[in-house]
Image (cartoon, coloured by chain):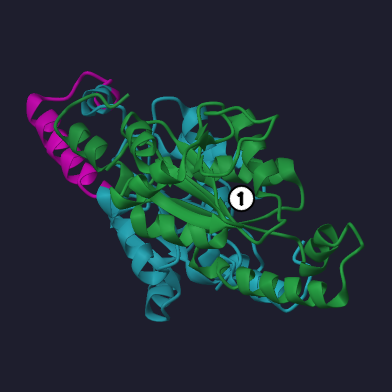
Chain colours: A green, B cyan
Amino acid sequence: MAKGLLIVLSGPSGVGKGTINQRVRELSPDIKKSVSVTTRLQRPNEKDGIHYHFISQNEFDNLIKNNGLLEYAKVYQNYYGTPKKPVIDALEKGIDMIFELDIQGARLIKQAYDDCVRIFITPPSIEELQNRLNNRGTETEEVKALRLSETIKELNEAKYYDYMVVNNDVEKAAKTIIDIISAEKARTLRNENKINKLIQGDNII
Amino acid sequence: MAKGLLIVLSGPSGVGKGTINQRVRELSPDIKKSVSVTTRLQRPNEKDGIHYHFISQNEFDNLIKNNGLLEYAKVYQNYYGTPKKPVIDALEKGIDMIFELDIQGARLIKQAYDDCVRIFITPPSIEELQNRLNNRGTETEEVKALRLSETIKELNEAKYYDYMVVNNDVEKAAKTIIDIISAEKARTLRNENKINKLIQGDNII
């Protein structure tokens, strides 16, 4: 088993995965973020290799063909994906990797890497999430109803996750995620080598 | 499912379960320690209801007969046990309970209460544990060899636990146990009610 943890943050659209992810890495700078590949055009404020690896459609197709992606999706004519090799290399070195993915991406990554730890971020209530999403105030009732049904569908996925964390307070949510990472590292199923070493008479500190 | 967590600390004799347990409760005073019942005579420095509930052999036998104990053991002619009712009552109220038990007690409590969280405390090395146990320096080689084989037998149980925590530094070990408790509270399998409430439109904070 790889030494690093692959941590997946997911949850309904608008729940604040990005803000929590950033705060987790500020509090625990050893945890690294995965940089996705995309076929989308680079925006002026974006840096290649930091925000995304910007690649051609041909390069993206080759990654798919060679099983080089842990998950990918098409969003508005552009492709986005998580390259497998840098993630696996980092995990093997004992580096913890954190991902923020939509529900679909989180489902795909579980299939590609079963040992991932999946954390579902929820809002304190559907109402609060709808308020955040509707804050521009220009949506029609139809759009709002569609969004609500989408949110409910997404929340129904929570039970398939290992953990759920309510995003009522970013600081508290980030702290709980750091506790989860600490606890997961102490699970016996990740420490069988250590137990064996101990029994053989080795010092494990 | 009960709202409080039943946390079991176990590990080989001499590993320091008691010291860690005490430090955990100092850091998290909301976590309560279970008070065992015993047929042993009360010592002058002990308080009934604090250190133990001192009861008669007849009372102990009745507890066994009425399935009133989560686990019990006989040690040097005296009986020790964990009374079931106060523990279950506390858990139902949402109070977290922590126990320190030997390997045998930890096995029994898992049978009586499957939802317990079991943490195995290990020494940094067998050598260090033997040094702690032999520190009086008066033991024969035979006693030491017997103790070593007992320790190895105990360490072999670690893999059946949910978590393992190395007691190299009491502060660090106690902190990891508190992280584990925080993470366990966030497990989706303990939060199905919350997920359902959220989907029904309730506020879960």
Q: Is residue B151 magenta?
A: yes
- Magenta span: chief secondary structure: helix
Q: Is residue A32 left or right of residue A126?
A: left
In the picture of the structure, the residue carrying the numbered disc 1 is B31
Q: Where, quadrant-wise, is the C terminus of chain A in this rendering?
A: top left
In depth, the one of A54 and A148 nearer the eye is: A54
Query: Is B193 above or below relative to B30?
Result: below
Query: Is B189 above or below relative to A3?
Result: below
**Residue A50 in the image, given as x and y percentages of width and height:** 56, 29
Residue occupying image coordinates x 56% and y 26%: A29
> Can residue B7 be seen by looking at this rendering?
no
Q: Which subunit holds the residue at mark 1?
A: B
Q: Secondary structure at mark 1?
A: loop
Query: Is B194 above or below relative to B205?
Result: below
**Residue A42 in the image, given as x and y percentages of width and height:** 61, 35
Q: Is residue B51 left or right of residue A176?
A: left
In depth, the one of A75 and B201 nearer the eye is: A75
